Image (cartoon, helix red, strand yellow):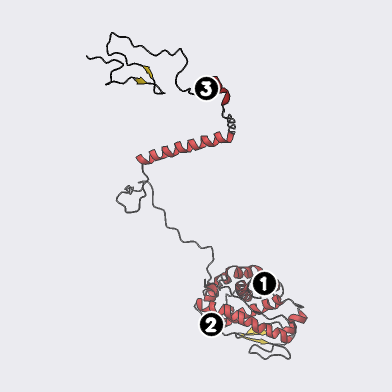
Amino acid sequence: MAQHSADDPERPPFTGVDGGPTMAFPPESPDSPTVAEDLTGPPTGPIVATWAFDDLLQSAPAVWPEPKPPAPARKPGFYVSLTVAVMLAIGLVAALVVLSFRPPVTRTAGEPTGVHIPNLPPPTNSTPPEASAPSSTVPQADGPLADLAEHPLSTSTATMAPFACALPRFDPADGGQARFYQAAKVCADTGFGDLLPASGLDAASIQVVTVQKGPEDTPCGAVAPTDPATQCQGTVYMTPARLRDVEGLDRYPGKYLGVFLREYAAAVQYATGLTDLYEKAKDAPDAPGDLADRLAQQATCLAGVASGAMAGLGAVDSNITNEIRERLTTTDAPPDAGSWLEKGSGTREPDSCNTWV
């Protein structure tokens, strides 16, 4: 192998930082040791700045992160809620497992997948029960009361629809009462005008006469201003002097309206043929002695039907409704007038007014 000296132009010596020679390349011989430059003397090149390790530590103080505060302690409710949630999750998983093996099945009658249950024969030592007759909580009318009990005004389940009744400011004078009764007639015509056809009956044309000065001639006899209010052959006769001066109803319009509604209902009984059935039953040999009371009870109940349909609407407020009840359950009232009035106003149906069974 050829050797090159330090002066060999083909291989320039190693130069230092400042361009001067520092050391020669060692000979390419394994037997020649490598001689390094003497570094014990003063440096010949440029001085590079250095820092001691301790100076670095002092010049850059360590910045330690602030310790985090400890987590707040869990409340007992947290562990209770966690336990409940875990148990619910376990129960849900268990339910899903059970449903996967036994899925719910909804069976419909006649469905092929339904379970067939065979009809079992009856026991050999038993006999089939005897058929019992149908029972009824309402006694059936017979004899002279049968036709009255079967009249549509006694059996209809049609309901009088609620409606508003417009009444003028009440004036107890004769003329003021006359205007009041004509307005009340419009209200009653509205209620019964729909109820009767719905019950299979013809609409009734009811007339109203206010007896103010002298007696009024009627097919049923003369009616004086001081006589009780009444109806005759489908016409209502109201007597202001009687209600104001004899009975002393004062300025309570509901009491006057109650009397009017009862007499209007009695006129409806006549117009629909029920009063004729009553006259026939009254003449029967086995007629009960309370037929007149039953006729008045039915009229009171039908007045309750109209009162219930008007209650709380238009001019008929709670005061007037209470006044109707007070008047119809006291003066010239039939037995149990209060209960019959309640039946009518509560259901607003004629079949609640069947006093003949």
Q: Dot 3 lies on which element?
A: loop
Q: Name the residue rendered at 67%, 72% in the picture.
A: 317
Q: Is residue 107 left or right of residue 216?
A: left
Q: Quadrant of the N terminus?
A: top left
Q: Name the residue rendered at 31%, 21% in the picture.
A: 12
Q: Mark 3 highlights which residue?
A: 51
Q: Dot 2 lies on which element?
A: loop
Give the residue type at disc 3. Answer: Trp
N-term-proximal mark, 1 vs 3? 3
Res 151 seen here: no
Crowding around mark 3 (Cα neighbors within 10 Å: few <14, some 14 to 19, many 20+) is few
Q: Mark 1 highlights which residue?
A: 317
| Mark 2 and mark 1 residues within 8 Å of each other at the beta carbon | no
Quadrant of the image occupied by residue 232: bottom right
Q: Is residue 293 left or right of residue 43?
A: right
Crowding around mark 1 (Cα neighbors within 10 Å: few <14, some 14 to 19, many 20+) is few
| Mark 2 and mark 3 residues within 8 Å of each other at the beta carbon | no
Q: Is residue 181 above or below residue 21?
A: below
Crowding around mark 2 (Cα neighbors within 10 Å: few <14, some 14 to 19, many 20+) is some
Q: Mark 2 highlights which residue?
A: 203
Q: Is residue 50 above or below residue 115?
A: above
* Distance from Cα at disc 1 to Cα at disc 3: 106 Å
Q: Name the residue rendered at 28%, 18% in the picture.
A: 8
Q: Nearer the viewer, mark 2 or mark 1?
A: 1
Residue 158 in picture, x, y percent from top left: 52, 72
Give the residue type at disc 2. Answer: Ala
Which disc is residue 177 wearing? Answer: none
Most extreme residue toward the left, as rendered? 1
